[in-house]
Image (cartoon, grey):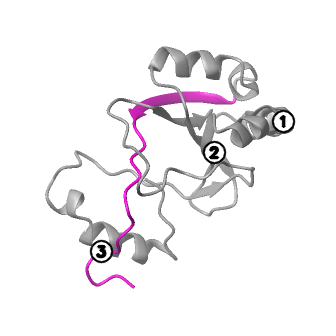
Amino acid sequence: MLLEVPDEAGLRDYLAAEPFNKLGVWERVTTFPFRIAPLPYQALPQPGTPIATRRTHTVIIAHDGKDPGAPERRLAVREAHLARVRPMAADGTLAVGGAILDATGQRMVGSVAVIARDTDDAARAWMAEDPYVTGKVWQDIALHGTRFAPLPWRPLPGAA
């Protein structure tokens, strides 16, 4: 889930009111400062669009190495990575992506990418050619299968 909240207090307020969090549906919640890459993304499914009955996408959460050379490796291949994913955003392969930021919000320390791949194997094949993989930027990678559901947005009770 991507949330736009003004600060840590806003995040805490949201999570305190989020029904899945309150009712224990979510086993754990991990949050990261995040910046969406400015790419030509396709529109997400809107209400009225048929709901997929199976996995449609994979969420990739990739943390960079923590060694002293990690920031330089990222910067060395960043333009090649963006050149690769820009057309994928335009054609819908990359639904959304961007950088995980450090606690100060200043330094990129990882990435989140939501890609139209319906299996872990297909997601791994997609990642295998990415400069952040071949350039050894991403060191700790988790894949999470999901399906996009075009649900109407409704604010939580008490939210603006």
Q: Residue at x 52, y 28 (%)?
A: 141
Say what secondary structure mark 3 lies in.
loop
Q: What is the chief secondary structure element of the magenta stretch?
A: loop
Q: Please tell me whether residue 6 belongs to the stretch shown in magenta.
A: no
Q: Quadrant of residue 87?
A: top right
Identify whether 114 is placed above or below 36. above
Gap in angstroms between the C-alphas marked 3 and 1: 38 Å
Identify whether 101 is placed above or below 146. below
Q: Farthest left residue?
A: 23
Instruction: Please name the amino acid that badge 2 sits on.
Output: Val
Q: Nearer the viewer, residue 73 or 111?
A: 111
Instruction: Please name the amino acid that badge 3 sits on.
Output: Leu
Q: Please tell me whether residue 141 belongs to the stretch shown in magenta.
A: yes
Mark identifier at residue 156: 3
Identify whether 75 is placed above or below 13. above
The location of residue 27, given as percent across then percent down, is 22, 45
Say what secondary structure mark 2 lies in.
strand
Instruction: Please name the amino acid that badge 1 sits on.
Output: Ala
Gap in angstroms between the C-alphas marked 2 and 1: 20 Å
Q: Residue at x 63, y 30 (%)?
A: 138
* N-terminal-most mark, 3 or 2: 2
Say what secondary structure mark 1 lies in.
helix
Per the rendered image, the range of residues in magenta is 137-160
Mark identifier at residue 109: 2
Mark identifier at residue 83: 1
